[in-house]
Image: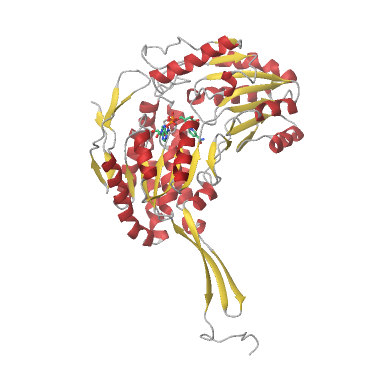
Amino acid sequence: MAEQLNNIVRGNKQPQNGATRYTVVNPADGKTILAEFASSSASDTADAVTAAREAFVAWKDTPVVKRCRILFHYKELLEQRSGQIAEMIVRENGKLLSEAEGELRRGIEVVEFAAGMPSLMKGDFIEDIAANVDGYIYREPLGVVAGACPFNFPVMIPLWMFPVAIACGNTFVLKPSEKCPLSAAYLVEIALEAGIPPGVLNVVHGGRETFEALIDNPDVRAISFVGSTPAAKNVWERAGVAGKRVQSLGGAKNYIIVMPDADPKETVKAIISSSFGCAGERCMASSIALFVGDAQRMLSDVAAAAKDLTLGNGLDQHSDMGPVISAEHKARVEHYIAIGEQEGARLLLDGRGQKAAGLPNGFFIGPTIFSNVAPSMRIAQEEIFGPVLCAMFAPNLDAALAIANGSAYGNGASIFTSSGGAARRFRSVIQCGMLGINTGVPAPMAFFSFGGHKNSFFGDLRAHGPDGVEFYTKKKTVIDRWPGSGGTGSIWGK
Ligand code: NAD
């Protein structure tokens, strides 16, 4: 029976009153309805913001160590329920169980990071900047923060946002992806069970309109966003017009540059995992493999390994790749494969029409590889967000770097080589935010910050890590002067 999904406001479940209806279908079988729900109306959204604004007063004054003690308990509960959460992710998103477990682990690491907030939030002090005058800086929370998430990491991305925000003393309104809202809502239920007070963490369900209402609400002070580039740009512009602090992470087109001296076995394994892991629905997926010179010989091994991947339900341990998120998305990816053919790229492996055993209606596309892709082709320039790998060739490293830097995106890029010099040249010249050297998915861990360059990121401060703390706090600088009240001068040697 399909779950009726409700908003969570002041710690209570509340039905939404919006006009749009959403249905969440298990992408592996293409038919099981997991949840049905309505969007939030303008007054539902406003009510969640009011709840967060009211809760802020006491939460801001709750000592940071107490706030963090709740997060420690939250982490414990997440660990205890990890199996259940990972299965929920698989059911609504389609990825493999091992991928869901990995996603949750990366999210829990952000909770662990946020639980260290007493050290992270500390300010700075200098005595005697003038006679009897001291100066110091300390951090305060901003107030109500709103965040919206994409479908592809339904647990990790909410956990990038609210643990850091609330550890800093903010209150939060989360809008999960309307395509994968179940596991995100469950995360919030567990947080309330861990002791997060009512109103500190709220959930509103819906799509674009719901999040735009949050952006426009004057009581919301800052906006965290992760999604496709057109949406990220809209969020950044709209929040900017409203004068709000905003971090807005967008789409990607990531390159793996393969040098002739790269370890062939490791490189092929990394390309397969990066390009086809999570069915290519990762913002850090390598969608282009750029072979330099003789490295081209490795392409046939990539194609052979990709051909061997078994499609299936993510809960089945024999599956190597799950479905994409929806029938619409499957059609979109297949459309891009047709565009690649029209553009004259060579289709080495065609995943269209492939099905998983026993799942005839699942939203599956097999691994797809194009060779001889030119940088000007749409399949090279646009984000496809599915299991489609484009292979390109370049005569030398600088030619490869020039091609990669021609991309409008700048999320991640990797190089595979055994040359320190090539790795160093790559690191210094490539225009991307997150770089891998002999690693295919260079996603930063919780204590670093996550975010790209160019059309992959809009804003200044990235997700989690030190930027996250900076983003969710504002500073006060105090000049303290107490003339004559406590005496002056040193008592050393008296
Ligand atoms: P999406 O942009 O369709 O939706 C993301 C969120 O934005 C959802 O909550 C949705 O309701 C909301 N939304 C949609 N259109 C909007 C608009 N115009 N204005 C405001 N909000 C809007 O993305 P998706 O399909 O759910 O997720 C996949 C995309 O997310 C890919 O482009 C992927 O690269 C990107 N992504 C980026 C990162 C990153 O770190 N840069 C991480 C994960 C996913």
Image quadrant where residue 260 sits: top right
Residue reaching furthest to the bottom: 494
Residue reaching furthest to the front: 241
- Please tell me in which quarter of the rendered image ligand 1 is found: top left
Q: Could you tell me if residue 205 is visible in this image?
A: yes
Image quadrant where residue 41 sits: top left
- Would residue 407 be found to the left or right of residue 418 on screen? left
Front residue of 74 and 252: 252
Front residue of 335 and 307: 335
In this picture the colour scheme is secondary structure
Picture quarter with the C terminus: bottom right
User: How far from the left and from the top, in percent, is residue 332?
Assistant: 45, 18
Q: Is residue 386 above or below residue 115?
A: above
Q: Could you tell me if residue 77 is visible in this image?
A: no
- Would residue 458 be found to the left or right of residue 7 on screen? right
Picture quarter with the N terminus: top left
Residue drawn at 43 percent across, 31 percent down: 100
Please count the marks in the image.
0
User: How far from the left and from the top, in percent, is residue 37?
Assistant: 27, 31
Front residue of 333 and 75: 333
User: How far from the left and from the top, in percent, is residue 21?
Assistant: 27, 28
User: How far from the left and from the top, in percent, is residue 359?
Assistant: 37, 14
Front residue of 387 and 319: 387
